[in-house]
Amino acid sequence: LGPFLSKSFATSVSPWVVMPEALKPFRCAQPARAEGDPRPLAYLYDETDQQHGALDIELEVLLLTETMRNRGLAPQRITLSSTKNMYWTVAQMVAHHSVNGCSLQPGDLFGSGTLSGETTDSCGSLLEITQGGKQALELPSGETRTFLEDGDEVILKARCRREGHASIGFGECR
């Protein structure tokens, strides 16, 4: 479970606290694993969790360069993904994190890991979008990016939407 390995720097939290009860309408089944992937070990597998343990949260990342800002251009969306692309449910991450005796406390932060979808416009990182820096991302200012540069601003947004339910926004992180 890589989500715990490299998320200990540059961490940010939503400006809004969203209670688990508010997310109930956005719970869904955990997507099936790819053919050939082994079934999780018994301590990581619960049928109820597999049926209702995933969340459908839309994740959007935008990029605003210094040049774009100076020209009054809007940020460019570089990806749109979802927490439905998580390989592990939150319950599985908690179980894995605590199985070795880790002292998990209320308020501790969990990094989900990269959440990439199946299409190129849902890649979960700039590294994936640019294929490791081999294919530049073209921006409306005429600039290109393979990696972030000084003055670049990354904007993260997240929200839950489902017909018949109030939309829940998590605020914006820049």
Image (spheres, rainbow, N blue to C red):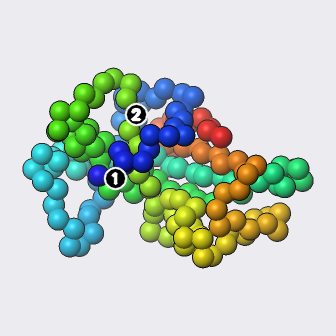
Name the residue located 44 percent from the left edge and 44 percent from the top edge.
7
* Image quadrant where residue 141 sits: bottom right
* Image quadrant where residue 111 sits: top left
Name the residue located 60 percent from the left edge and 76 percent from the top edge.
134
Label placed on residue 32: none
Q: In this view, does 64 lie to the left or right of 89?
A: right
- Label 2 sits on a secondary structure element that is loop
Looking at the picture, how far across and down is residue 136, in whole percent?
67, 72
Q: Nearer the viewer, residue 132 or 34?
A: 132
Q: Dividing the image into 4 quarters, which one contains the C terminus? A: top right
The residue pinned by badge 2 equals 109
Name the residue located 46 percent from the left edge and 29 percent from the top edge.
18
The residue pinned by badge 1 equals 2
Q: Which of 38 and 104 is in front in this view?
A: 104
Up the image or down, 147 lies above or below 154; here it is: below
Any part of residue 94 in sight: yes
- Label 1 sits on a secondary structure element that is helix
